[in-house]
Image: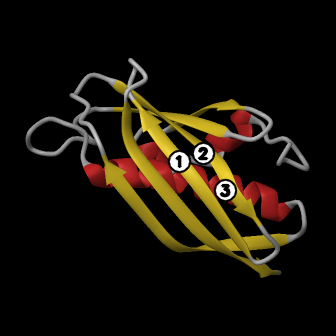
Amino acid sequence: MIWKVKPSLEILNESSKNTMVEHLDISFSDIGDDYLEATMPVSHKTVQPFRILHGGASVVLAETLGSVASNIVAAADNHQVVGLEVNANHLKSAKEGQVVTGRVKPIKIGRRIHVWQIEIKDESMNLLCSSRLTVAVLSN
């Protein structure tokens, strides 16, 4: 298990109030021993002019999942994290009206660097976006 203290979905969703996460209707939905999931509707807030999921919205979902997971892990040791790099490969589109789900899992949880893999899938479990987030771990 990667969580020293397993986070509460209720607390994670409450902490998203008045942020971009809330604005895009991202909701933390599941926590496992080595992953965190969140959903995001493909709506007028997250589509591009062709009414399909905007790649930037996918990156917001990916970075949200990776950053939150990393902060949970780091906070247990009284550390904080800052993002260094995020990338995303957009593999398939999702149409307005669908809900997408992102799942983050660690690639490496080190003393100074965390690397996270995020996969975003549609309701049919098609892989839409594969993303990676790297963060630096800082001492408080």
Extreme residue toward the bottom, this view? 139
**Does residue 104 appear left or right of residue 58 in this picture?**
right
Extreme residue toward the left, this view? 50
Numbered circle sitting on residue 132: none
Query: Residue 137, percent across and down?
Result: 73, 75
Label 2 sits on a secondary structure element that is strand
**Circle 1/circle 3 CB separation < 8 Å:** no
Q: What amino acid does circle 3 point to?
A: Ile
Q: Which residue is mark 3?
A: 107
Camera-near label (2 vs 3) is 3
What sort of colour scheme is used for the picture?
Answer: secondary structure
Estimate how packed mark 2 is, as few (under 14), some (14 to 19) or many (20 or more) residues with alpha carbons within 10 Å: many
Estimate how packed mark 1 is, as few (under 14), some (14 to 19) or many (20 or more) residues with alpha carbons within 10 Å: many
Which quadrant of the figure has residue 120?
top left
Relative to residue 77, is residue 63 depicted above or below?
above
Q: Which residue is mark 1?
A: 118
Residue at 8% across, 39% down: 50
**Circle 2/circle 3 CB separation < 8 Å:** no
Quote the CA–CA distance across marks 2 and 3.
10 Å
Can residue 19 be seen from the camera position used here?
Answer: no
Q: Earlier in the sequence, mark 1 or mark 3?
A: 3
Quarter holding the N terminus? top right
**Circle 1/circle 2 CB separation < 8 Å:** yes
Q: Which residue is mark 2?
A: 104
Quarter holding the C terminus? bottom right
Q: Earlier in the sequence, mark 1 or mark 2?
A: 2
